[in-house]
Structures are given as C-alpha cells and as structure tokens.
Image: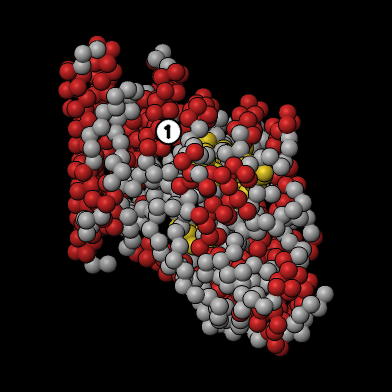
Amino acid sequence: MEKSGWREKIDGCVAAYRHLFEMYETEIPESGLLAGIHQPMLKYNFAKSSQVWEIFEADNMHYPMGNACFEYGIGGVLDRTAQRLSADTQESAVYRQGIHDVYVEVRSFLLRHEARARRLSEEAVDPADGKRLLRIAENCGALAKERPRGFVQALQLFWFLYLLRSPFGGGCIGRLDQRLYPFYRMDLENGVWDRQEALSVIIQFYEKLNRMTTGDTLRNLMLSGQDEKGEDQTNELTYLFLEAYERTQDAEPHLNVRIHEKTPQRLKEICIRMLASGKGQPTIYFDRNILPAMERAGIAREDACGYANDGCTETVYEGKSGITFWQHEMVKTVELTVFNGKENPFLYPVSMKKNRALAPSFEPHTSLELGFCSGDVEEMQSFADFLDAFHSQLDFQLSHWIRVIDQRIEADERDTLTSPLIGGTFQESVCTGKDPLRGGGFSVPNYQLLSGTVSTAADCLRAVEYCVFEKKYCTLTKLRDAMAADFEGHEILRQRLLHAPKYGNGDERVNELAALISRWFLDRVSAYRSQSGKRIHPGLYNIDFKIFANITGATPDGRRFRDAIGEHCSPTPGAAVSGPTAIVQSAAALPMEEGYASSVLQLTLDGSGFVMGADRERIISRLMEGSEKAGIPVWNLAMYEKQELLEAREHPEKHKDLIVRVWGFNARFVELDEELQDHIINRIS
C-alpha cells in the first residue's frame, strides 16, 4: 500500500469514530452503577457517514478485545501512544497516532459521563441517590485517567469499550470471569468485596444487553477453563455470571462453559440445572476434546488454554487472535456432483431473511465454483464411481477455498487495517505501534474453513447407495431427473429416498460415510500452509444452514428445494427418530476432535415427549458425560414443547419471553422469521 494511502485510511477511521462517539447519548442510570447505553436507532444515523466501514475492515466483532486498557488504563494507553520510537516505521508511526487520536475521544466520552453524573448528584434530592450518582461520576473520572480499581470499575470500563466498539450493539465478550478476576482479587485484598453489589452490576450489564437487539448478536461469554498446567480457572465471578443469568432468564448474553478433568462438581451441577430448564444455556465445551488438536496444530499450550468462542461457537484465542472464517457448502457439493458441476436447474432466486423477522431481505447465492465436471452420472456403474466423483468435486471446491483464503492471508500480511480502537486494546500494538495483524497482538493466526453440514450430505450419499445400487429403485439418471423436477411427479421415489437410512439413528453405514467425507475435508484443510507457514483451522460446522437450504435444489435424501438442511454435526431436522443416544452415537463416529475451529453437536428434545420427570437432571448429566466420552468437542442441549412453539407462532403476543437456542446463540422465538421458526420446530427429536 502507498504510505499516503495508509495515512488516509487511518484518518478516515479516526474521523468515523469521532462521528460515532459524538452521537452516543450520555446515559446515567436511574438505579445501579453501570453507566452507558446504546441508542436503538443509532445505526441508521451512523449509516449516513461514508466512513462507517473504515472502522470495520478488520473488526468483524467476532473476537474479544485485548487487555491493554485493563493493564494500563485509558491514560496509560494515551501516554504510550504519544511516544515516538526510533524503531517506528512510517506505518507504525501513523497507526500509533491513530490509536492515540481514537483514545482521546474515548477519554472524552468517559469524561462526559463523569460530568453529567456529578451534576445529577448535586441536584439529587435523596442523599442516598446523590451518593450513588457521585460514585458513578468518580468511577468514570478515574477510568478516564488510570486502570480500574476494583470489580465495578473494571466492568464499567469493559462496558464503555464494548459500547464504543460497535454502533450495532453486538460483539464477542470473551472470558470475562478471567479478565475481571484480578479486580475481584483487588477488592478482596482491600476488604471492600461486596458480592451482592457485584451480582447487581452484572445483572444490570445483562439487562442493558437485552434492551438492545437480541439474537445473532455475537454476545458470547465464555466461562471457566484451565491454565497451561491443567489447573482449574473457575472462580467466584464464574458463579456470579451464571447466577445473574438464572435471575434474568433472557436471551442475552449467550453463555458457554468449559469443562475439563478438574472442573468443580458444583459448576457441573449448575450447568446441568440450567440446561434442564430447556433454554439451551449454557453451551458446553469439553477441553479434553479440543485442546489436543490445537496443540497438534502447533498452537502453544498457553495460547490453546486461553481459547474462547466468537459470535457463535468458533474458537478464538483471547488476547492472541482475531478470526476470519469461510463456510464450505457440503450438501451443495452433492448437488454439483449429481449435475456434473452445474446447479440443479429447478433453482430460482429466493428472497429471504437471515434469522430475524424484522431483518432486511436478501437474495442468497452459492459461493462455490461452478463448471467443474466431476463425471456424468449416466456413465457411473457403481456407488464407488459416484463416491469418487463426489470426492473429486469436493477436492476441487476446497482448492477454490484455499485460493480465496490464501489471498486474504497475503492481504493481512501486507496492508489490512485493524481498527485503531481495537488496536488500542492490545498491549503489543500500544507499545510497538504495529497493527495486531502484523506483530501487534495477533500471535495466533486464526483463519478458519468450516465444512458445511456433513450429516445431510451423508444422508444424500447413503440414499444414492441404498436406493440406486442396493435396492435398485431407480438409476442415477432417473434420480437426477427427479431432482431436476424437485420430485414433482416422482413422489414414490421421493418417499423411498426419505426412508433410506439417515444419520442420527445409529446406522453404521451412514455414520461411516459421514466420517469419510469429514476426514476428506479435515485432511485437505489441515495440510494447507501459506507461504509464511500459516494454517487454516478446520471445523465440522455450518452456521448458514438456512441460507444453504435456499441455494441448494432437491437432493438425493428426498429433501426438496428449500427444505431444511441440518446444522453442524446434528441430524437433518426430522431425520432422527431413535432418540438422543442414537444421535450421540452417530456423532461419535465422526472425527470431530480434529475440527478444532468448531465441531458442534446440538440436541433438541421435545420437552413434553421426552418424559424425564424427577430424573431430568440425572439424564442430562449422563447425556453430557456420554457426549464428552464420545469425543464431541462442543455440545448443546435444548428442550422445547412443540405445541408451545406452534402456539407462539400463532399468537406471538402471548409468548414474548419464550427463548430458544438457534445455533451459536439464543433468541426470542417470536422475533425469528417464520422459516427459522419452522426449522427449530422440525429439528425436535
């Protein structure tokens, strides 16, 4: 990049932040100690600025912020970025100045809150309220100058930075129980720790999150874990963050808990009790099924043990990485195999919403490369021929993805800009002036390729084998023609395909095929190295299953165009009929532990049909233990009464507080679009 262009880019980013911060309301709460709030309409006002996307070039808000402001304070960040080093390059000098200019605005934002809180305290009629307001003022004023002095100030600083990071009210939270633990210790040592006050301010934090948009907000909070010596990191704050959620019971934040050999029994029991409520909180991460693959991939144990999750369930390395990810379309790859590199001719443009009923509509398109001829089905004489063609098509598509990712890695190594606000949260960036992508903090490169849905793809392959070559219900040519007609006029064949063995029922052959295509994907992705030695982190995962269902035509498993595709390593909705144990058995056949970017099993049970009575928590405990032993890295369980969901769709005004697990997040059921509501209802086992 031309250095003049670099300065122009930084200047535009600083100007955009200045514009953003000026528009934020200076909010002092009527009760409690946590100041600051998002304005619901802010994004529409801010969108008028032509500089808006300058901020977000390399801040997709999917990764936690760094720790510099907790270590140095806002004043310390300003002092360090005001310095000029002899080692500065033109780029680092400009970037350092950009951080400094943005944090001048951050300090002004805090001081505005101090001034207003102090004025309100002087006007307060109630002496107790005046004292509360004065404390808010003192907290804001202190945070504008120095590092936090205790838990409440530390959470207030996090909240201010979280607000300022995103005008849209979303973003990854990270391991907040670990980040704030030193300030809890500080309070203990000073004899001022007040558990009830801490719980109250956490509840206020949650309530502020839920006043904003809920759903796919990226607000993942990771709790507990272990250090590099294997010692448990559960602390008092871990329990407080969980207790606060049990008291609020709303959609935000999205809770995640890391479980390992030394996890306290008390923590496991709380997780099981919460899961028994049926809302899908928290998601469980099994360290024993995640850390080894990270270390085999060359990630230092200390860094691996610091993993958290991003906006959904993809792994990030807190304080050490950002994240950029892509999603392969595994089921679409089956379609391209059947049609020899072309899309199903029945496809037509679809207008859809990603998940929220009030979200804007868009028209999705495949990201795969069309035109690769993997073989004409009319010339295939055996299932082995078809499987070879699928493997060829998959290999071609993965080559395409690797080229795309390689280009992104080169751009990040050369000139991609990380926003100065985020750069200022990383100690290395503050001290060196380097962008986190180039020596300023992201010491663990985190480029991920996610597989798409291996379960539905395996159902498709097994249906070809079973219906075409074993039962001989049709030829491959007839199957292709039926798919091209979206099975119109071919209902008997479609029913036979639907009744072929399906993943999630413990069938050995379909499990074997799911494992095979998973291994093909993992091996190819894991073998990649960029010129600078960077890897692509693989995962058996599918965030955009709903989008993919709208760009993939009828498939050999009997699904029609726009019918559901499964998520992650979970069964296709409606396919699992043998209970949760069989689903776990199918997932256990996959090499999920090698997909350390994220490999997830999500169980959705019928709260009325799956009768557990007084044994509910014991059964959940056994399912959780069995899933851990089966090698599943990430596990989520939710239970809903199907009839309640159907009633909520018909009468949303009566069910505004009904929370459901979508994939990597929870949401209010009535706020989801109808297509996603159907998906959640139909995946109940």
Q: Is residue 104 left or right of residue 319?
A: left
In the rendered image, the vertical position of residue 148 relative to residue 46, given as above or below? above
Label 1 belongs to which residue? 206
Q: Which residue lies furthest to the top in this view?
A: 127
Camera-side residue: 429 or 600?
600
Q: In this view, does 105 lie to the left or right of 392?
A: left
Q: Which residue is found at the position 72% from the left and 59% from the top?
A: 503
* Residue 325 in sight from this viewpoint: yes
Picture coordinates of residue 16, whole percent (x, y): 22, 52
In the rendered image, the vertical position of residue 226 relative to residue 554, given as above or below? above
Q: Which colour scheme is used?
A: secondary structure
Q: Which residue lies furthest to the right in this view?
A: 471
Q: Which amino acid does label 1 sit on?
A: Tyr
In the rendered image, the vertical position of residue 333 relative to residue 315, given as above or below? below
Camera-side residue: 30 or 494?
494
Q: Is residue 418 left or right of residue 185?
A: left
Q: Residue furthest front?
A: 651
The residue carrying pointer 1 sits among few (fewer than 14), some (14 to 19) or many (20 or more) residues within 10 Å by Cα, namely: many
Q: Which residue is found at the position 68% from the left and 69% from the top?
A: 558
Count how many numbered circles sit on residues in the image. Answer: 1
Picture coordinates of residue 233, whole percent (x, y): 55, 32
* Residue 432 in sight from this viewpoint: no
Q: Which residue is found at the position 54% from the left and 52% from the top?
A: 677
Picture coordinates of residue 570, whole percent (x, y): 65, 54
Look at the numbered disc 1 and give the secondary structure of its residue. Answer: helix
Camera-side residue: 171 or 396?
171
Picture coordinates of residue 291, whole percent (x, y): 60, 46
Camera-side residue: 685 or 599?
685
Q: Which residue is found at the position 46% from the left and 18% from the top?
A: 195
Q: Is residue 237 left or right of residue 574?
A: left
Which of the 4 image quadrants contains residue 506?
bottom right
